[in-house]
Image (spheres, rainbow, N blue to C red):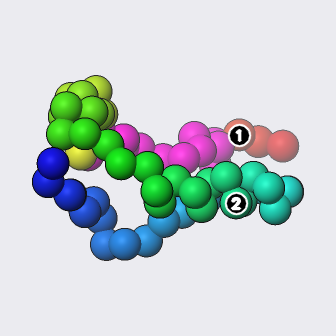
Amino acid sequence: MEQRTLGNGLVVFPGTKRVRYLEENAAAVDVKLSDDELARIDAAVPVGAAAGDRYPNMSFVHV
């Protein structure tokens, strides 16, 4: 199986309050996906599929 590198080597972890969760997230480096699994992921969420703002524009709301 061909090893494929995605991105530029940076890994972003969601915020966590517990070391054990950070360790669990870091263990993902050992996960090996098959070519079929990678193809299924690419089909489900193609590059560029996530778009838009994280939060809606609330500038029109008057407080």
Residue 43, x across and y down, in percent: 21, 29
Residue 16, x across and y down, in percent: 77, 55
Q: Residue furthest left?
A: 2
The part of the image, by quadrant, that contains residue 38 is top left
Magenta stretch in the rendered image: 48-60
Circle 2: residue type: Glu
Q: Residue 61 got which mark?
A: 1
The part of the image, by quadrant, that contains residue 55 is top right
Residue in the image at 60% along x and 61% along y: 26
Q: Characterize the local packing of mark 2: few (<14), some (14-19) or many (20 or more) Cα atoms within 10 angstroms.
A: few
Nearer-the-camera pick, 9 or 24: 24
Residue 59, x across and y down, in percent: 64, 48
Nearer-the-camera pick, 4 or 45: 4
Decide whether the magenta segment is chiefly helix, strand or loop.
loop
Q: Characterize the local packing of mark 1: few (<14), some (14-19) or many (20 or more) Cα atoms within 10 angstroms.
A: few
On the image, numbered disc 2 is attached to which residue?
A: 23
